Amino acid sequence: MKQRVVTALLLAPLAIALILLLPTPAFAVVIGGLCLLAAWEWTRLSGLRDRRVRGVLLAFATLAFWALWHWRDHDTVILVIAAGAAWWVVALFWLKQFSFAAAPTRENTLLKLVVGMFVVFPAWIALMRIHAAPDHGHWWALYALVLGWSADTFAYLAGMRWGRRKLAPSISPGKTWAGVYGGLAATAVVAAIGGWLLGVQDLRLLALVVLALLCVCFSIVGDLFESLIKRHAGVKDSGALFPGHGGVFDRLDGIFALLPLFALGKLLLGL
């Protein structure tokens, strides 16, 4: 716990500074780098061991990021973001079938690598479009990320204090329903206050809070899905970059699931 807190206290100010101070092109490079690290971890979790092949896949992923950036303002990118959001609905059914694709076969590795595309790329371009918005885009990007961070933090605290009934014991024994309720309660408060500070009022503020709650539900699915894949791989963490927190994917799993839905919802609400 101490190590988790120290790491979070060191990283949070840096993350906030990067979000608010960097122009979107520079922000895209930084977050793209983190996403590539997450993708590298995902290739290992998927069962791919050959580092040369993983390196080639990372090179193709870099090209995909460049292509998405080049077409970031095109309507086609909305379809990419929508596909990312839709994937997490499909993931719900996978979570119910714990053993699906668990065997270390070539076909299952390929399936998980394809899934990784739906996880990483839509989230990255969704965040870039939010960050680049002319009306307080940097603050909206921070708002979206804070939703995930606050939900995760308060879920952890509520689960430690009141957690009894397990959420998905066969996938992630540490997660409880009390943690879910604590995360959602914190999300409602953060979403309302943050939306008000960003000038959202009346029914649109209520709609924003509902959107935030839905996004956090997606983030829980993202967290559980990564836990499932780690179970398949027989590892505790995706990596060891962040002491007490694990790897990059361990820190971004819920965020990856949250961002596409938030970007779509924000667009539909005209914010």
Image (tube, rainbow, N blue to C red):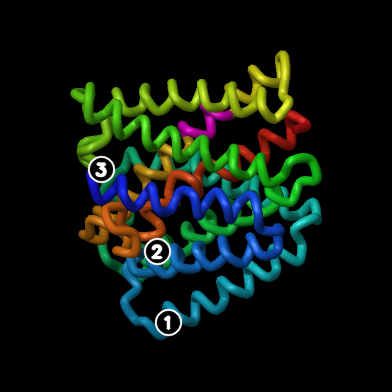
Please say if the residues under marks 2 and 3 sit with CB atoms less than 8 Å apart.
no
Question: How far across and how far down the image is residue 83, in percent?
Answer: 61, 48
CA separation in Å, label 1 and label 2 = 13 Å
Q: Which residue is mark 2?
A: 42
Range covered by the magenta-colored residues:
212-217
Residue under the image location 71 percent in, 59 percent down = 23
On the rendered structure, is 58 left or right of 195? left
Q: Is residue 221 above or below residue 202?
A: below
Q: Quadrant of the N terminus?
A: top left
Q: Quadrant of the C terminus?
A: top right
For the residue carrying disc 3, how many other residues have a C-alpha within 10 Å: few (<14), some (14-19), or many (20+)? many
Q: Which residue is mark 1?
A: 53
> Is 216 one of the magenta-colored residues?
yes
| Circle 1: residue type | Val
On the rendered structure, is 212 left or right of 97? right
> Can the viewer see residue 102?
no
Residue under the image location 50 percent in, 44 percent down = 257
Q: Which residue is mark 3?
A: 171
Q: Is the stretch drawn in magenta largely helix, strand or loop?
A: helix
| Circle 3: residue type | Ile
Q: Nearer the viewer, residue 86 or 132?
A: 132
CA separation in Å, label 1 and label 3 = 29 Å
Question: How far across and how far down the image is residue 88, in percent?
Answer: 49, 43
> Is 1 one of the magenta-colored residues?
no
Residue under the image location 42 percent in, 77 percent down = 54
> Can the viewer see residue 242?
yes
Please say if the residues under marks 1 and 3 sit with CB atoms less than 8 Å apart.
no
